Amino acid sequence: MVRLGFITGFIALIGVLLSGLAAYRVHEQELTVDGIALARAIDVHASLVQDRLTERELLARVSAGLFRSPSVIKANMLQPLRSSIYAFKTDFVVAGWVARLKPEELSAAHTELANAGFPNSTIRSFDDNPLQASTVSGPVDVVMDVEPRNAETMSFAGRSLDRHPILGPMLASAMSELTPVASDPLPLLRKDGPMGLVLAAPVLQDNGTQPVGFVIFSYELGPLMLTNDDLSLFSVALKDPRNDDNELIATERGSVVSRSASSQGSVLIRKVFFGGRDWTLTYYAKTNAMNRARQTAAIVAAIGLALTAIVCGLFGYVAYNNLRLSREIQVRIGFERRLTAVIDELNHRVKNILAVIQSIVTRTLRHGSDIDSARELLIGRIHAMSNVVSLLSESQWQGVYLKGLFEARAIPHAERIAISGPDIVVSARAAQSLSLLFFELASHSDEGLSLVGKHPHIVAHWEVTGEEPETVFHFRWEEFNTSEATRRADSDFGLILLDRVAPEALGGTSKRYFTDVSYVYELTAPMETVVDMSERDRTEQFSAPLKPVR
């Protein structure tokens, strides 16, 4: 079981390590895949924004190149371009013609605007303060035409933009660089209007080197750069060129608002070019890739641990059943082997008993014996053998107590025998010899019994002397009030048993004699043969419960 537990634990350890490794790999792969997917989506968005910006700048360049008018003081300069502009792109908020006028041209411009039907034809500053030609020292940039024309856009006509805080620097830059220039973000149409950009493209007359005016287009900032799908992986913000600490974002309603630059989440930067300047787009991941990777890794680890538990459980179940079956087989084999040994031992003991019985019958029924006396002796001797076998069976052949051999059912007139001595356990072989010996001694003392009365006339005493391992067993049988004349003579079987069989069986010596008042039989033998521990150990092996082999 310990080895099985070790193997199962080792498998579990490997499963845990593999689950952890798989979770780590999945975690890293999820981060990598999410990073690649996010980067690709951002690149696509930035590319689309750049394409959109390039198209708008191309529109401005084309529109500026189509101007072929000998005079710029006209209020319908966009009329020839309307069809071309709308065929190209229509997502601008306002398109306009800004003429660069000299002070002496302001009066003509006022007349032209009035004739074109603009509601306020006065030449004025960007904040609607009228301009006096006498106060103007150089050219001014005046809005002369707008598209589309409606009540809100027509109010811009006549305004001078060169002193506008945002549009003025834009026009100056376009005039000096002679390329389209974009303004900083500003509200369009009105102070609370949508946030947007204005793109100005300088217009040159044939063979001219200085712009005579500008074609301007204004675009809402949200659709131009900040549009994004709600299901996309990121949100986009535009770094505010007016303040590096702020950024512009599109709300859910489409309006553009300013906020402080965020420092949370995954940030990727992309730059786009529009109107002669770089614009910085900041992309924020909508989902936390790290948390998502951790969750996925946790799921993989949980699945791996569950599979490890299932594998360990199945392995443990199968291995335990195999081990139990193996043990049952080993126990069965051991049982069969021991059963064979027990049968062999039983055969050996039965043969010994039958041999003893055969010897008893042969010696008892020798020719010339009195048949009645012989029958009684034969029954008594077999009964003595039967009694000792019963005692040995009860003790599982571990031996019997010596005093138990003097029971009344085995020895005639056992109640008249005084016994004394330590209650030692003798071996099965010694018990069989001593049982027949005691029966033989008791059965030949019948003649003396009539002289005793109520008092015992037989004393059986034994003792153990010496020290281990040289201890000696001494047995003494003494019959009082008897003599050679009164005591029945021992039979041939009895003499053989007393003088040869019993001493040889115990590895000792014996003697018998008469005194003036008694008959004495003495038996001396080594204690190791009387107890015979080797026989007891062998019997204990047969009777011990079977243990499975580990």
Image (cartoon, rainbow, N blue to C red):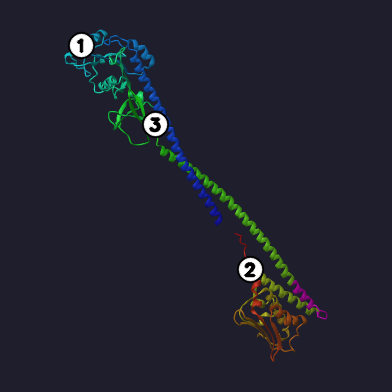
- Which residues, given as a range, are shown in magenta? 353-370
Q: CA distance from mark 1 to mark 2?
A: 140 Å
Q: Nearer the viewer, mark 3 or mark 1?
A: 1
Residue located beneath label 2 in the image: 540
Q: What amino acid is at disc 2?
A: Glu
Q: Residue furthest top?
A: 115
Dominant SS type (magenta): helix
Query: Image quadrant of residue 214?
Result: top left
Percent of width and height locating residue 114? 24, 9
Quarter of the C terminus within the rendering: bottom right
Q: Nearer the viewer, mark 2 or mark 3?
A: 3
Marking on residue 234? 3
| Residue drawn where x is 23% and y is 17% of the image | 160
Q: Residue furthest right?
A: 367
Helix, strand or loop at label 2? It is helix
Q: Is residue 381 magenta?
A: no
Q: What amino acid is at disc 1?
A: Glu
Q: CA distance from mark 3 to mark 1?
A: 55 Å
First in sequence: mark 1 or mark 2?
A: 1
Percent of width and height locating residue 99? 26, 14
Q: Nearer the viewer, residue 524 or 312?
A: 312
Seen in the picture, residue 205 relative to 257 is either above or below; the reply is above
Percent of width and height locating residue 519? 70, 87
Q: Nearer the viewer, residue 432 or 148?
A: 148
Seen in the picture, residue 474 relative to 350 is either above or below; the reply is below
Q: CA distance from mark 2 to mark 3?
A: 85 Å
Q: Residue furthest left?
A: 134
| Residue drawn where x is 76% and y is 80% of the image | 493
Helix, strand or loop at label 1? It is helix
